[in-house]
Image: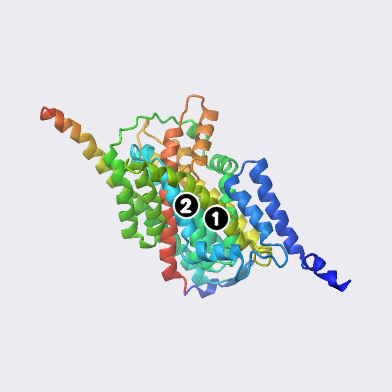
Protein backbone atom coordinates (compact mmCIF):
# COMPACT_ATOMS: atom_id res chain seq x y z
CA UNK A 1 0.00 0.00 0.00
CA UNK A 2 2.89 2.35 0.77
CA UNK A 3 5.04 1.09 -2.13
CA UNK A 4 5.40 4.64 -3.51
CA UNK A 5 7.67 5.35 -0.51
CA UNK A 6 10.26 2.73 -1.52
CA UNK A 7 13.82 4.03 -1.93
CA UNK A 8 17.45 3.01 -1.39
CA UNK A 9 18.67 4.01 2.10
CA UNK A 10 22.29 4.11 3.29
CA UNK A 11 21.89 0.79 5.13
CA UNK A 12 19.73 -0.98 2.53
CA UNK A 13 16.49 -0.78 0.58
CA UNK A 14 13.68 1.04 2.39
CA UNK A 15 10.15 -0.22 1.88
CA UNK A 16 7.00 1.75 2.45
CA UNK A 17 5.58 -1.30 4.19
CA UNK A 18 8.34 -1.17 6.81
CA UNK A 19 7.79 2.57 7.34
CA UNK A 20 4.09 1.88 7.97
CA UNK A 21 5.03 -0.95 10.34
CA UNK A 22 7.40 1.36 12.26
CA UNK A 23 4.62 3.93 12.72
CA UNK A 24 2.26 1.15 13.80
CA UNK A 25 4.86 -0.05 16.30
CA UNK A 26 5.26 3.48 17.65
CA UNK A 27 1.52 3.98 18.08
CA UNK A 28 0.61 0.61 19.53
CA UNK A 29 3.86 0.33 21.50
CA UNK A 30 3.53 3.64 23.32
CA UNK A 31 -0.20 3.05 23.86
CA UNK A 32 0.51 -0.43 25.26
CA UNK A 33 3.20 0.82 27.65
CA UNK A 34 1.08 3.71 28.88
CA UNK A 35 -1.92 1.39 29.45
CA UNK A 36 0.25 -1.04 31.46
CA UNK A 37 1.74 1.81 33.51
CA UNK A 38 -1.69 3.37 34.06
CA UNK A 39 -3.11 0.06 35.27
CA UNK A 40 -0.17 -0.42 37.66
CA UNK A 41 -0.69 3.18 38.85
CA UNK A 42 -4.37 2.47 39.57
CA UNK A 43 -3.56 -0.74 41.43
CA UNK A 44 -0.88 0.98 43.55
CA UNK A 45 -3.21 3.91 44.23
CA UNK A 46 -5.99 1.58 45.39
CA UNK A 47 -3.59 -0.47 47.54
CA UNK A 48 -2.24 2.71 49.16
CA UNK A 49 -5.78 3.96 49.84
CA UNK A 50 -6.82 0.65 51.34
CA UNK A 51 -3.69 0.62 53.51
CA UNK A 52 -4.21 4.21 54.73
CA UNK A 53 -7.91 3.60 55.53
CA UNK A 54 -7.25 0.63 57.77
CA UNK A 55 -5.64 2.47 60.70
CA UNK A 56 -8.50 5.04 60.60
CA UNK A 57 -11.09 2.24 60.72
CA UNK A 58 -9.29 0.72 63.66
CA UNK A 59 -9.31 4.04 65.50
CA UNK A 60 -13.03 4.49 64.85
CA UNK A 61 -13.79 1.02 66.18
CA UNK A 62 -11.71 1.71 69.27
CA UNK A 63 -9.01 -0.74 68.19
CA UNK B 1 62.74 -24.49 8.91
CA UNK B 2 59.35 -25.71 7.74
CA UNK B 3 58.96 -27.58 11.03
CA UNK B 4 58.75 -24.19 12.78
CA UNK B 5 56.12 -22.77 10.43
CA UNK B 6 53.41 -23.54 13.02
CA UNK B 7 54.90 -20.82 15.24
CA UNK B 8 54.03 -18.13 12.71
CA UNK B 9 50.68 -19.61 11.71
CA UNK B 10 48.78 -17.43 14.19
CA UNK B 11 50.63 -14.31 13.14
CA UNK B 12 49.85 -14.96 9.49
CA UNK B 13 46.17 -15.36 10.34
CA UNK B 14 45.85 -11.83 11.72
CA UNK B 15 43.59 -9.56 9.69
CA UNK B 16 43.21 -5.77 10.00
CA UNK B 17 39.63 -6.29 11.21
CA UNK B 18 40.99 -8.34 14.13
CA UNK B 19 43.41 -5.55 15.00
CA UNK B 20 40.47 -3.10 15.00
CA UNK B 21 38.64 -5.39 17.44
CA UNK B 22 41.70 -5.59 19.72
CA UNK B 23 41.62 -1.79 19.76
CA UNK B 24 37.87 -1.83 20.51
CA UNK B 25 38.42 -4.33 23.33
CA UNK B 26 41.28 -2.27 24.74
CA UNK B 27 39.13 0.88 24.54
CA UNK B 28 36.35 -0.81 26.53
CA UNK B 29 38.83 -1.92 29.19
CA UNK B 30 40.34 1.59 29.29
CA UNK B 31 36.90 3.22 29.63
CA UNK B 32 36.05 0.82 32.44
CA UNK B 33 39.27 1.30 34.40
CA UNK B 34 40.16 4.91 33.67
CA UNK B 35 36.70 6.45 33.35
CA UNK B 36 34.81 4.05 35.64
CA UNK B 37 32.22 3.26 32.93
CA UNK B 38 30.33 0.09 33.99
CA UNK B 39 33.60 -1.77 34.81
CA UNK B 40 31.85 -5.00 35.78
CA UNK B 41 30.57 -5.38 32.22
CA UNK B 42 32.98 -3.49 30.03
CA UNK B 43 36.08 -5.29 31.35
CA UNK B 44 34.73 -8.81 30.59
CA UNK B 45 33.36 -7.57 27.25
CA UNK B 46 36.59 -5.84 26.31
CA UNK B 47 38.69 -8.86 27.22
CA UNK B 48 36.21 -11.12 25.42
CA UNK B 49 36.48 -8.96 22.30
CA UNK B 50 40.24 -9.60 22.24
CA UNK B 51 39.79 -13.30 23.07
CA UNK B 52 37.38 -14.11 20.23
CA UNK B 53 39.40 -12.12 17.70
CA UNK B 54 42.66 -14.02 17.95
CA UNK B 55 43.39 -16.06 14.82
CA UNK B 56 42.26 -19.71 15.10
CA UNK B 57 41.06 -18.95 18.62
CA UNK B 58 40.25 -21.95 20.75
CA UNK B 59 37.27 -20.28 22.45
CA UNK B 60 35.14 -20.54 19.30
CA UNK B 61 34.02 -23.56 17.31
CA UNK B 62 32.03 -26.57 18.49
CA UNK B 63 34.30 -27.19 21.49
CA UNK B 64 35.02 -23.51 22.22
CA UNK B 65 34.00 -22.32 25.68
CA UNK B 66 32.74 -18.87 24.63
CA UNK B 67 30.63 -20.35 21.83
CA UNK B 68 29.22 -22.93 24.28
CA UNK B 69 28.46 -20.28 26.89
CA UNK B 70 26.68 -18.21 24.25
CA UNK B 71 24.72 -21.17 22.92
CA UNK B 72 23.57 -22.34 26.36
CA UNK B 73 23.45 -19.09 28.29
CA UNK B 74 21.92 -16.77 25.72
CA UNK B 75 21.06 -18.56 22.49
CA UNK B 76 18.99 -21.41 23.91
CA UNK B 77 16.88 -19.62 26.52
CA UNK B 78 18.32 -16.15 27.24
CA UNK B 79 19.04 -17.61 30.69
CA UNK B 80 21.89 -15.23 31.54
CA UNK B 81 20.09 -11.88 31.04
CA UNK B 82 16.97 -13.27 32.73
CA UNK B 83 18.84 -14.59 35.77
CA UNK B 84 20.57 -11.22 36.05
CA UNK B 85 17.09 -9.71 36.34
CA UNK B 86 16.44 -11.72 39.51
CA UNK B 87 19.47 -10.05 41.04
CA UNK B 88 18.44 -6.60 39.81
CA UNK B 89 14.93 -7.11 41.22
CA UNK B 90 16.42 -8.07 44.58
CA UNK B 91 18.40 -4.81 44.60
CA UNK B 92 15.56 -2.42 43.75
CA UNK B 93 13.54 -0.68 46.42
CA UNK B 94 10.24 0.32 44.81
CA UNK B 95 9.32 2.30 47.94
CA UNK B 96 9.84 5.81 46.44
CA UNK B 97 7.66 4.79 43.50
CA UNK B 98 4.94 3.20 45.61
CA UNK B 99 4.69 6.29 47.78
CA UNK B 100 4.35 8.49 44.69
CA UNK B 101 2.83 6.29 41.96
CA UNK B 102 2.34 9.20 39.53
CA UNK B 103 5.98 8.63 38.62
CA UNK B 104 4.96 5.40 36.88
CA UNK B 105 3.74 7.43 33.92
CA UNK B 106 7.24 8.77 33.31
CA UNK B 107 8.52 5.21 33.19
CA UNK B 108 6.20 4.77 30.21
CA UNK B 109 6.71 8.12 28.49
CA UNK B 110 10.49 7.90 28.60
CA UNK B 111 10.42 4.86 26.32
CA UNK B 112 9.50 7.10 23.37
CA UNK B 113 13.09 7.12 22.09
CA UNK B 114 12.86 3.38 21.42
CA UNK B 115 10.03 3.77 18.94
CA UNK B 116 11.40 6.95 17.38
CA UNK B 117 14.68 5.14 16.75
CA UNK B 118 12.95 2.15 15.18
CA UNK B 119 11.37 4.55 12.68
CA UNK B 120 14.69 6.27 12.03
CA UNK B 121 16.46 2.94 11.53
CA UNK B 122 13.79 1.82 9.06
CA UNK B 123 14.17 5.11 7.16
CA UNK B 124 17.92 4.41 6.93
CA UNK B 125 17.21 1.04 5.36
CA UNK B 126 17.67 -1.43 8.23
CA UNK B 127 15.37 -4.47 8.19
CA UNK B 128 12.56 -4.23 10.73
CA UNK B 129 14.08 -6.83 13.10
CA UNK B 130 17.38 -4.93 13.27
CA UNK B 131 15.57 -1.59 13.57
CA UNK B 132 13.54 -2.89 16.52
CA UNK B 133 16.65 -4.31 18.17
CA UNK B 134 18.55 -1.03 17.71
CA UNK B 135 15.63 0.92 19.15
CA UNK B 136 15.69 -1.15 22.33
CA UNK B 137 19.15 0.26 23.11
CA UNK B 138 17.02 3.20 24.28
CA UNK B 139 15.54 1.00 26.99
CA UNK B 140 18.85 1.77 28.76
CA UNK B 141 18.66 -1.76 29.98
CA UNK B 142 21.40 -4.22 28.97
CA UNK B 143 19.58 -7.50 29.65
CA UNK B 144 16.44 -6.33 27.79
CA UNK B 145 18.52 -5.17 24.82
CA UNK B 146 20.30 -8.54 24.63
CA UNK B 147 17.05 -10.46 24.97
CA UNK B 148 15.20 -8.54 22.26
CA UNK B 149 18.14 -8.56 19.81
CA UNK B 150 18.68 -12.26 20.40
CA UNK B 151 15.00 -13.22 20.11
CA UNK B 152 14.62 -11.21 16.89
CA UNK B 153 17.86 -12.79 15.60
CA UNK B 154 19.37 -9.40 14.86
CA UNK B 155 22.65 -9.29 12.97
CA UNK B 156 23.91 -6.60 15.33
CA UNK B 157 23.53 -8.20 18.77
CA UNK B 158 27.16 -7.47 19.66
CA UNK B 159 27.01 -3.79 18.66
CA UNK B 160 23.65 -3.39 20.39
CA UNK B 161 24.97 -4.84 23.63
CA UNK B 162 28.11 -2.73 23.57
CA UNK B 163 26.00 0.37 22.85
CA UNK B 164 23.43 -0.42 25.56
CA UNK B 165 26.02 -0.81 28.28
CA UNK B 166 28.39 1.94 27.23
CA UNK B 167 25.65 4.56 26.74
CA UNK B 168 24.24 3.63 30.14
CA UNK B 169 27.59 4.70 31.54
CA UNK B 170 27.37 7.90 29.48
CA UNK B 171 24.03 8.98 31.01
CA UNK B 172 25.72 11.84 32.94
CA UNK B 173 26.88 13.25 29.61
CA UNK B 174 23.89 12.49 27.36
CA UNK B 175 20.99 13.45 29.62
CA UNK B 176 21.99 16.99 30.69
CA UNK B 177 22.53 17.88 27.02
CA UNK B 178 19.12 16.49 25.97
CA UNK B 179 17.30 18.04 28.95
CA UNK B 180 18.72 21.51 28.26
CA UNK B 181 17.58 21.21 24.64
CA UNK B 182 13.91 21.11 25.64
CA UNK B 183 13.65 22.99 28.95
CA UNK B 184 14.02 26.59 30.09
CA UNK B 185 15.91 27.64 33.22
CA UNK B 186 12.58 28.57 34.82
CA UNK B 187 11.25 25.04 34.26
CA UNK B 188 14.42 23.48 35.63
CA UNK B 189 13.98 25.54 38.79
CA UNK B 190 10.48 24.24 39.58
CA UNK B 191 10.54 22.92 43.13
CA UNK B 192 8.84 19.68 44.08
CA UNK B 193 8.36 19.25 47.83
CA UNK B 194 8.65 15.61 48.88
CA UNK B 195 5.91 14.34 51.19
CA UNK B 196 5.99 10.58 50.80
CA UNK B 197 3.04 8.49 51.93
CA UNK B 198 3.94 5.52 54.07
CA UNK B 199 3.87 2.28 52.13
CA UNK B 200 2.60 -0.81 53.89
CA UNK B 201 4.52 -4.09 53.82
CA UNK B 202 1.48 -5.73 52.22
CA UNK B 203 1.62 -3.24 49.33
CA UNK B 204 5.33 -3.92 48.85
CA UNK B 205 4.68 -7.67 48.71
CA UNK B 206 1.63 -7.46 46.46
CA UNK B 207 3.28 -5.02 44.05
CA UNK B 208 5.66 -7.49 42.30
CA UNK B 209 2.90 -10.09 42.01
CA UNK B 210 0.33 -7.68 40.58
CA UNK B 211 2.80 -6.06 38.16
CA UNK B 212 3.68 -9.50 36.81
CA UNK B 213 0.00 -10.39 36.33
CA UNK B 214 -0.87 -7.05 34.66
CA UNK B 215 2.17 -7.10 32.34
CA UNK B 216 1.59 -10.79 31.62
CA UNK B 217 -2.04 -10.26 30.68
CA UNK B 218 -1.41 -7.27 28.41
CA UNK B 219 2.01 -8.16 26.99
CA UNK B 220 2.52 -11.91 27.51
CA UNK B 221 5.97 -11.89 25.89
CA UNK B 222 7.19 -9.46 28.54
CA UNK B 223 6.40 -11.92 31.28
CA UNK B 224 9.84 -13.53 31.31
CA UNK B 225 11.52 -10.14 31.75
CA UNK B 226 8.98 -8.63 34.14
CA UNK B 227 8.45 -11.90 35.97
CA UNK B 228 12.12 -12.49 36.77
CA UNK B 229 12.61 -8.86 37.80
CA UNK B 230 9.57 -9.02 40.07
CA UNK B 231 10.50 -12.44 41.42
CA UNK B 232 13.78 -10.95 42.61
CA UNK B 233 11.84 -8.09 44.20
CA UNK B 234 9.43 -10.47 45.93
CA UNK B 235 12.41 -12.29 47.46
CA UNK B 236 13.56 -8.90 48.76
CA UNK B 237 10.25 -7.68 50.12
CA UNK B 238 8.72 -10.85 51.58
CA UNK B 239 11.03 -10.60 54.59
CA UNK B 240 11.36 -14.37 54.86
CA UNK B 241 14.17 -15.05 52.41
CA UNK B 242 17.00 -12.90 53.61
CA UNK B 243 19.63 -15.47 52.65
CA UNK B 244 18.23 -15.78 49.12
CA UNK B 245 18.00 -12.00 48.80
CA UNK B 246 21.66 -11.61 49.70
CA UNK B 247 22.63 -14.38 47.27
CA UNK B 248 20.53 -12.87 44.46
CA UNK B 249 21.88 -9.34 44.82
CA UNK B 250 25.45 -10.45 45.47
CA UNK B 251 26.94 -13.75 44.29
CA UNK B 252 24.27 -14.53 41.64
CA UNK B 253 24.53 -11.08 40.05
CA UNK B 254 28.32 -11.13 40.17
CA UNK B 255 28.60 -14.63 38.70
CA UNK B 256 26.24 -13.87 35.83
CA UNK B 257 27.92 -10.52 35.20
CA UNK B 258 31.38 -12.11 34.90
CA UNK B 259 30.21 -14.54 32.27
CA UNK B 260 27.62 -12.33 30.54
CA UNK B 261 30.24 -9.85 29.37
CA UNK B 262 32.62 -12.45 28.04
CA UNK B 263 29.76 -14.44 26.49
CA UNK B 264 28.32 -11.42 24.70
CA UNK B 265 31.77 -10.92 23.19
CA UNK B 266 30.94 -13.95 21.02
CA UNK B 267 28.96 -11.48 18.92
CA UNK B 268 31.98 -9.21 18.60
CA UNK B 269 33.85 -11.30 16.04
CA UNK B 270 35.62 -9.06 13.55
CA UNK B 271 33.80 -10.33 10.46
CA UNK B 272 30.41 -9.51 12.03
CA UNK B 273 31.41 -6.36 13.91
CA UNK B 274 33.81 -4.35 11.76
CA UNK B 275 31.25 -3.00 9.32
CA UNK B 276 30.21 0.57 8.78
CA UNK B 277 26.56 -0.27 9.54
CA UNK B 278 27.69 -1.27 13.05
CA UNK B 279 28.66 2.37 13.53
CA UNK B 280 25.20 3.39 12.30
CA UNK B 281 23.60 1.07 14.88
CA UNK B 282 25.73 2.61 17.62
CA UNK B 283 24.70 6.11 16.46
CA UNK B 284 21.04 5.04 16.47
CA UNK B 285 21.45 3.89 20.07
CA UNK B 286 22.62 7.36 20.99
CA UNK B 287 19.57 8.86 19.29
CA UNK B 288 17.37 6.47 21.27
CA UNK B 289 18.87 7.66 24.57
CA UNK B 290 18.44 11.32 23.63
CA UNK B 291 14.82 10.91 22.53
CA UNK B 292 13.93 8.81 25.58
CA UNK B 293 15.09 11.73 27.69
CA UNK B 294 13.21 14.23 25.54
CA UNK B 295 10.07 12.03 25.63
CA UNK B 296 10.07 11.95 29.43
CA UNK B 297 10.66 15.70 29.72
CA UNK B 298 7.97 16.62 27.19
CA UNK B 299 5.46 14.32 28.91
CA UNK B 300 6.12 16.12 32.22
CA UNK B 301 5.59 19.45 30.47
CA UNK B 302 2.34 18.15 28.98
CA UNK B 303 1.10 17.06 32.40
CA UNK B 304 2.04 20.45 33.84
CA UNK B 305 -0.51 22.05 31.52
CA UNK B 306 -3.25 20.38 33.57
CA UNK B 307 -1.75 20.76 37.04
CA UNK B 308 -2.23 23.72 39.38
CA UNK B 309 0.72 25.87 40.48
CA UNK B 310 2.50 24.22 43.38
CA UNK B 311 1.68 20.74 42.10
CA UNK B 312 3.62 20.99 38.86
CA UNK B 313 6.44 18.61 37.97
CA UNK B 314 9.95 19.73 37.40
CA UNK B 315 10.19 18.42 33.80
CA UNK B 316 13.70 17.10 34.44
CA UNK B 317 12.15 14.39 36.62
CA UNK B 318 10.48 12.99 33.48
CA UNK B 319 13.93 12.31 32.04
CA UNK B 320 14.64 9.93 34.92
CA UNK B 321 11.97 7.59 33.51
CA UNK B 322 14.68 5.68 31.65
CA UNK B 323 15.95 2.45 33.09
CA UNK B 324 19.55 3.47 33.84
CA UNK B 325 19.32 3.16 37.61
CA UNK B 326 20.50 5.00 39.68
CA UNK B 327 22.66 7.10 37.29
CA UNK B 328 19.72 8.96 35.81
CA UNK B 329 18.22 9.89 39.20
CA UNK B 330 21.61 11.18 40.33
CA UNK B 331 21.95 13.30 37.18
CA UNK B 332 18.55 14.92 37.80
CA UNK B 333 19.39 15.63 41.44
CA UNK B 334 22.69 17.21 40.40
CA UNK B 335 21.06 19.32 37.69
CA UNK B 336 18.33 20.46 40.09
CA UNK B 337 20.94 21.62 42.60
CA UNK B 338 22.93 23.36 39.88
CA UNK B 339 19.87 25.48 39.01
CA UNK B 340 18.72 26.10 42.59
CA UNK B 341 20.72 25.01 45.63
CA UNK B 342 17.53 24.23 47.59
CA UNK B 343 15.88 22.15 44.88
CA UNK B 344 16.19 18.51 45.94
CA UNK B 345 14.66 16.26 43.28
CA UNK B 346 16.41 13.01 44.18
CA UNK B 347 13.51 11.05 45.66
CA UNK B 348 11.12 12.04 42.86
CA UNK B 349 13.77 11.11 40.31
CA UNK B 350 14.41 7.77 42.03
CA UNK B 351 10.66 7.04 41.79
CA UNK B 352 10.67 7.82 38.05
CA UNK B 353 13.89 5.86 37.61
CA UNK B 354 12.56 2.62 39.12
CA UNK B 355 9.39 3.13 37.08
CA UNK B 356 11.74 3.21 34.09
CA UNK B 357 12.97 -0.26 35.08
CA UNK B 358 9.42 -1.54 34.73
CA UNK B 359 8.74 0.56 31.61
CA UNK B 360 11.80 -0.73 29.79
CA UNK B 361 11.03 -4.41 30.32
CA UNK B 362 7.39 -3.83 29.35
CA UNK B 363 8.60 -1.99 26.23
CA UNK B 364 10.87 -4.93 25.38
CA UNK B 365 7.99 -7.36 25.81
CA UNK B 366 5.59 -5.25 23.75
CA UNK B 367 8.13 -4.96 20.92
CA UNK B 368 8.59 -8.74 20.89
CA UNK B 369 4.83 -9.20 20.84
CA UNK B 370 4.24 -6.68 18.04
CA UNK B 371 7.20 -8.11 16.10
CA UNK B 372 5.29 -11.36 15.71
CA UNK B 373 2.65 -9.62 13.62
CA UNK B 374 4.80 -6.94 11.95
CA UNK B 375 7.79 -9.03 10.79
CA UNK B 376 6.87 -11.42 8.01
Q: Residue furthest right?
A: B1
Q: Residue furthest left?
A: A61
**Residue B324, percent from left and from top:** 50, 45
Residue B318 to residue B155: above or below: above
* Nearest the eye: B240 or B82: B240
User: Which residue corresponds to mark 2?
Assistant: B84
Q: Tell me the crowding category of disc 2: few under 14, some 14 to 19, or many 20 or more residues within 10 angstroms, Cα based.
A: many
Q: Residue at x 30, y 36 (%)?
A: B199
The subunit carrying tag 2 is B
Tell me the quarter of the picture where residue B314 sits: top left
Question: In the figure, is residue B23 to the left or right of B302?
Answer: right
**Residue B176, percent from left and from top:** 56, 39
Residue B145 to residue B30: above or below: below
Q: CA distance from mark 2 to mark 1?
A: 9 Å
Mark 1 residue element? helix
User: Which residue corresponds to mark 1?
Assistant: B260
Q: Residue at x 66, y 57 (%)?
A: B49
Q: Tell me the crowding category of disc 1: few under 14, some 14 to 19, or many 20 or more residues within 10 angstroms, Cα based.
A: many
**Residue A14, percent from left and from top:** 57, 70
Asked if the residues shown at circle 2 and circle 1 are in contact, with their CB atoms under 8 angstroms apart, the answer is yes
Amino acid sequence: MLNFLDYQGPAGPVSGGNIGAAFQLMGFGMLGILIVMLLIFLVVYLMNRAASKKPEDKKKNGG
Amino acid sequence: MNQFAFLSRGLQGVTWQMVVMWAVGSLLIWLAIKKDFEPSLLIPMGFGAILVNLPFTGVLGDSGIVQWLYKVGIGASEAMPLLLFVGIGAMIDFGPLLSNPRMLLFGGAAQFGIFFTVLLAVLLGFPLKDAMSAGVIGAADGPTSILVAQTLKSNYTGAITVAAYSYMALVPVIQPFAIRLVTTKKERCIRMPYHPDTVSKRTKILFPILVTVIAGLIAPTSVALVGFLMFGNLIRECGKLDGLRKTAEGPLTNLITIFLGITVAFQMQADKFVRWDTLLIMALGLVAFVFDTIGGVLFAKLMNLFLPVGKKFNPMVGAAGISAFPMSARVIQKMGLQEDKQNHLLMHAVGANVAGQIGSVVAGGIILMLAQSLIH
